[in-house]
Image (cartoon, helix red, strand yellow):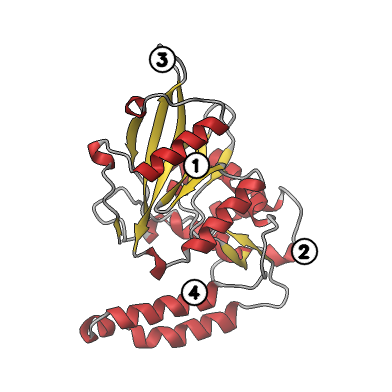
Amino acid sequence: MTVKANGFLQGCLPEELKKVLRSVASELGDVIDDMDSIQVVPLKGAMTNEVYQINWPLNDKRDLFRKVLVRIYGEGVDLFFNRDDEVQTFECISKHGQGPRLLGRFSDGRVEEFIHARTLSAADLRDPDVSALIASKLREFHNLEMPGPKNVLLWNRIRNWLKEARSLCILKDAKEFRLDALEEEICVLEEELTRDDQAIGFCHNDLQYGNIMMDEETRSITIIDYEYASYNPVAYDIANHFCEMAANYHTETPHILDYGAYPGLEERKRFVRNYLSSGVLFGPPHILTLKGPT
């Protein structure tokens, strides 16, 4: 996937974005007299978008600045998620007081509240104190009431991705990745893992360290980037977070997970205990009981 060339690196903001920024500034009680006074700072870490910190001065001395985040949508991401659904999800989560506020929109992206917090690292996920905070925030996220049907999206999404992979792969690659066998595996997993009493909640579905921010002073956690968010079994979201503990996206092979780093049984139990001890239960406590490996 790619990101549209928009001239940001040359310091030239699109006219549409300038108009939106002026409107955002006005809503915040600011005035941008000189667009040349705006500072553009590229931010690293985003995988499906380009993100920039935008600063404009709040006084004549230019020693105080307002900060917002501008997100430029990547191209080709429609293979993985629906952008319109993602924008609707972002707006709704923002209204719930979760994550950054939506400040403005333009054709290629949006303007968001700048979160004054640091993005977590792979090592942070293994810190027991930080992990407990994440578990509590994830439980809060799962309890969000979102519009639309509360149907499990997981299996249809995997099948859609498989369909896209088949259409894009040459025969040699399809055989190497055993794409023909995956449909059967999906059906087996769906049958084995689907339960009538499973807890369904609004899941993030991509809870890797780059999508979690923490305020160092208040120790509050903010979950960001909702491209894949949907209703799913909450146990799946927790299990996916465990898999993300085996990932490090700041290496030369970010797509290869190190399952030697997968959390052990006691670490997984601790996370689930912290999760269950916060918020309101979805149903009987046995629903999210963690069993040991067989």
Q: What element carries label 2?
A: loop
Q: Is residue 40 above or below residue 262?
A: above
Whether pointer 4 and pointer 3 mark residues with C-beta atoms closer than 8 Å, the reply is: no
Residue 98 coordinates in the image, percent (x, y): 62, 45
Work out how far the residue at label 2 is from the one at label 3, CA to CA, in angstroms. Answer: 53 Å
Return the residue at label 1.
Answer: 112
Q: What element carries label 4?
A: helix
Q: Which of marks 1 and 4 is in front?
A: 1
Q: Which amino acid does label 3 sit on?
A: Asp
Q: Is mark 3 on a helix, strand or loop?
A: loop
Work out how far the residue at label 1 is from the one at label 4, CA to CA, in angstroms. Answer: 28 Å
Q: Residue at (39%, 38%) from the top-left corner?
A: 18
Q: What residue type is labelled 2?
A: Gly
Q: Give the mark, 1 or 4, whose residue is nearer the N terminus.
A: 1
Residue nearest the observer in this picture, 290 or 141: 141
Q: In this view, does 125 lie above or below 205?
A: above
Residue 138 coordinates in the image, percent (x, y): 61, 51
Q: Nearer the viewer, mark 2 or mark 3?
A: 3
Residue 88 coordinates in the image, percent (x, y): 57, 58
**Taking the image as drawn, is residue 270 in sight?**
no
Return the residue at label 3.
Answer: 63
Return the residue at label 2.
Answer: 283
